[in-house]
Structures are given as structure tokens and as C-alpha cells.
Amino acid sequence: MGADDKVYRLLNYKNLLNRLKSIGFVKVFSDNLADTLDISPSLVRKDFREFGIRGAQKGGYTIEAVLIKINEVLGIDKKHKIIIVGAGRIGQALMHFPGFRKEGIIVSAGFDTDPEKIDGQTDIPIFHIKELTDYIKKNNIKLAILTVPENAAMGCLDMMEVGGVKGILNFTSMNLKSLKVAINNVNIGNEIENLIFTITKK
Amino acid sequence: MGADDKVYRLLNYKNLLNRLKSIGFVKVFSDNLADTLDISPSLVRKDFREFGIRGAQKGGYTIEAVLIKINEVLGIDKKHKIIIVGAGRIGQALMHFPGFRKEGIIVSAGFDTDPEKIDGQTDIPIFHIKELTDYIKKNNIKLAILTVPENAAMGCLDMMEVGGVKGILNFTSMNLKSLKVAINNVNIGNEIENLIFTITKK
DNA sequence: AAAAATATGTTATTTTAGTAACATAATAAT
DNA sequence: ATTATTATGTTACTAAAATAACATATTTTT
């Protein structure tokens, strides 16, 4: 487990707490969270302590206070601009991903090489990839989603590095690495194959 | 680390070896794989040994032999039918996901509630969700991708369980659990937030 | 043919993530 | 008011995953 896994766990807490809050809960116990997330109560308490979240010795944790603290720790309290590089089917789908808005993530532009797709007049403008580096610099873009064909992935990575992007969510099947940029690889093919393994071997 | 992480590592080996093979490599050393995958050479050797993959004491591993063995272990040598539940933007994008064909994964149908989307004549037919359970039973479907809105997720899970699905790749933001079905959650929002955390805090 | 080099196979060690256990504090009950 | 209860905060422990180390086998070189 890397440090990342702890962050994912924090995000799970957050999502679950938001859900509990929305149905009227105010307080929560480490046992509640542990049960639904399939972890031990002591791990919940340990995580909360590490991030400076404190509860009452008998009354559990106040959901609202925990959520504020988690958002603070995660840095999600601000707006974040993101661009989508590759306006194919998946890229276009992600441009309208409903989960982004409520998290304060704003898709500010898309990029592609296909002249058919380029259009600066749509709600989310789509520019030619040759303008990628400039756009990133001019608009101070730090986040990108990469949804180009595999053979274009490395080239786009270079351009984004030069532009100054700091984090990339990579949907291509190319496992990308970089010393300058944080990259999260989401390999859909691998997820399916993992599932196939699970259902056939276990 | 669960048993799953080892499977993901095997998939990484596989992808990398396929790439090396495609550019003409025949043999590979544990060091080569370890370097590109950011793990230690001894872990590569340990993994290979566990899966019955053996190399030559000096000559390294024969790529082709390793690939055959990995595919055997993963069970990817067969064809697998899959359905996509939810024919929204992401669902439709995944229907034509290029990575599936080469892995022997066949998208056999889509499901939605919107009458506008239902069409049995397209290359991949889209049926109404009320036919979901029946279709799964009649066609012996074991795998599904879930791309419906969050509030519809639980209901679809029930139907798929009844039908007899064994594995679900869940793209909804609802963290699903089941005792009957293996579920892989892919939470795009979480991936972005993780990235935001990484670039702001580290 | 003998010696040197090198990459595997395997064991020992280290690291770390997660759980279990318990003492403490706060609340509730009598 | 006193006692019992209960959930936190923290420490100790366990489990297991990854690395490091090394002995062995094979190949290459001289």
C-alpha cells in the first residue's frame, strides 16, 4: 500500500459521510464507517487521528466537522480547471461527466487533431492539439485527462510537461511515467481482465 | 496489498512484454521489467516463480513463453461476452472501446431506460432495462459494466445478481458491494481528487 | 579447459499496513 | 452521587508484502 491508498480511503470516508449527511445523520461512530467500508474501526480512528480529526470520547464523530477537515486535507475546497486531451468517445463523455461539477472541477477545454471535432464556439471549446502547450501556459492549467489513442500518448505527455501540467489522469492503455508530472493510470482493459481472473479463478 | 494487486502486476508484465515483443525483443531480464515498472527485480522473479514461469540461469526469460503462461494464469485465452448497463455517454463510449477486441472481450448488448436509445438493429443492440435479467439468463452473461446514474445503481445490481452475473465493473460513484458478485469500482471523481491531492500536497 | 561473469532461484530480512487490545474519558443509568 | 457503560485515543502486536542478499547454474572469455 502506498500513501495513495490512504487518500483513496479518505475519499471513501468522504463519500460515505456525504451520503449519511444527506439522509439526516449528524454523528457517526468508527464502527459504522468500518462496517460499510470493510475495514477495522481502529483503522478509521487511526486515519482520523493522523489527519487531526478528533471525536468525543463517547459521542463519536460529528459528520460535518469530519467533512470539513477531510476537504481541507484533500484540498478540494477550491475550484480546479482541467483540460481533456483527446476528444474521442471517452474524452467527450468525460467532458460532461456529472461528478465533476459538484467537486468544483471545471472542464475548460478539449483538444484533438481531427478538424471535424475542432470548434471554439461550443460550451467547452475544442482546439487543435498543436495549441495544447500554449493553452496550458496561458490559462495556467495544472490538471489534464488523457484520452488519445495509445500511439499519441507519449507525444501529448511531452507537450503537457512543457506547458506545465502537474497532474494527468491517463485513460490510454499506455502505462505512462514521468518525473515532472503526477500520473494516475486508469486502464479499463486491465480492470476487465482483473474481473475475469476473479470470476474464473476464485 | 490484496491478491488483486498481484493480478494487476501480472497485467503490467503482460502489457509491457507485448510491447517489447512488438518491437522485436525475444528475451527479457528481471531487471528490465523491474526498472520500467518501478519494482525490484526480486519481486519479478518471485512473481514468475509463483506462477510457474521459469527462466534460464543466465539468459533471462523468453518473452513468448512468459506471455503464454501469463495468459494461461489469467484465463484470457478465451472469449468473454459482456453487457453494458446504462447507454449514456460513458456507456456508449465503452461499447466501442478499442482495447476490448484484442483481449477477446465482446460487448453483446447495452441496456437503458430511455426509449430514444433502445434499438435492436444496431451492431450492438440496446434493450430496455426491464429485459436485463432475462437477457443475462438466456445468454449466460457473466460480466457487466455498470454506467447508470448513481440512484439507479443498486436496482441494476439486484437485477444482475438475479440474472446470474458474476463480475461487474462499476463506473457509478456509488461504492457497491455484494456477496454474490465480484465488483470492481472505478470512481473517476476519486481519481481526479486523488490527483489534486497529489499535486497540491506533495 | 579453466576462470570469470552474470542472471536466475531461493532464503532471510526489513518494512509497513492493518488489527487487536486496552486504558481513558465522557455519558447514561441507578 | 456513584456505578456501569460505551466509544474514543493510543500502544502493542500480527501479518504479509517487498526488498536485499546470496548461493547456484549457465554462459562467455581467455
Image (spheres, coloured by chain):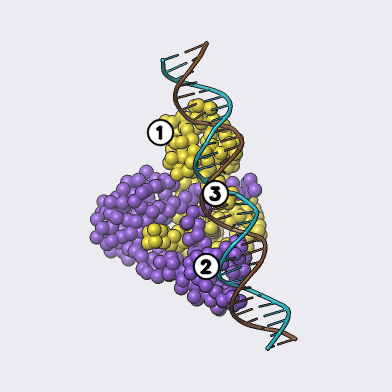
Chain colours: A yellow, B purple, C cyan, D brown
Q: CA distance from mark 2 to mark 1?
A: 49 Å
Q: Nearer the viewer, mark 2 or mark 1?
A: 2
Circle 1 SS class: loop
Label 3 Cα crowd, 10 Å radius (few <14 / some 14-19 / many 20+): few
Left or right of A105? Residue B110 is: left
Judging by the rendered image, the residue that carries numbered circle 1 is A23
Instruction: Give me the chain letter of mark 2.
Output: B
Q: CA distance from mark 1 to mark 3?
A: 27 Å
Q: Which mark is residue A5?
A: 3
Q: In which quadrant is the C terminus of chain A drawn?
A: bottom left
Question: Does the residue at mark 1 contact the one at mark 3 (Cβ under 8 Å)?
Answer: no
The percent position of residue B87, horizontal first and vertical second, equals 36, 55
Label 1 Cα crowd, 10 Å radius (few <14 / some 14-19 / many 20+): few
* Residue B41 in sight here: yes
Instruction: Give me the chain letter of mark 3.
Output: A
In the image, what residue type sits under mark 2? Phe
Is B158 above or below relative to C10? above
Of residues B60 and A142, the one nearer the viewer is: B60
Q: In the rendered image, which quarter is residue B108 located in? A: bottom left
Of residues B145 and B1, the one nearer the viewer is: B1
Circle 3 SS class: helix
Residue at image point 40% right, 66% down: B75
Judging by the rendered image, the residue that carries numbered circle 2 is B48
Is B171 above or below relative to A35? below
Q: Nearer the viewer, mark 1 or mark 3?
A: 3
In the image, what residue type sits under mark 1? Ile
* Residue A14 in sight here: no
Of residues B190 and B46, the one nearer the viewer is: B46
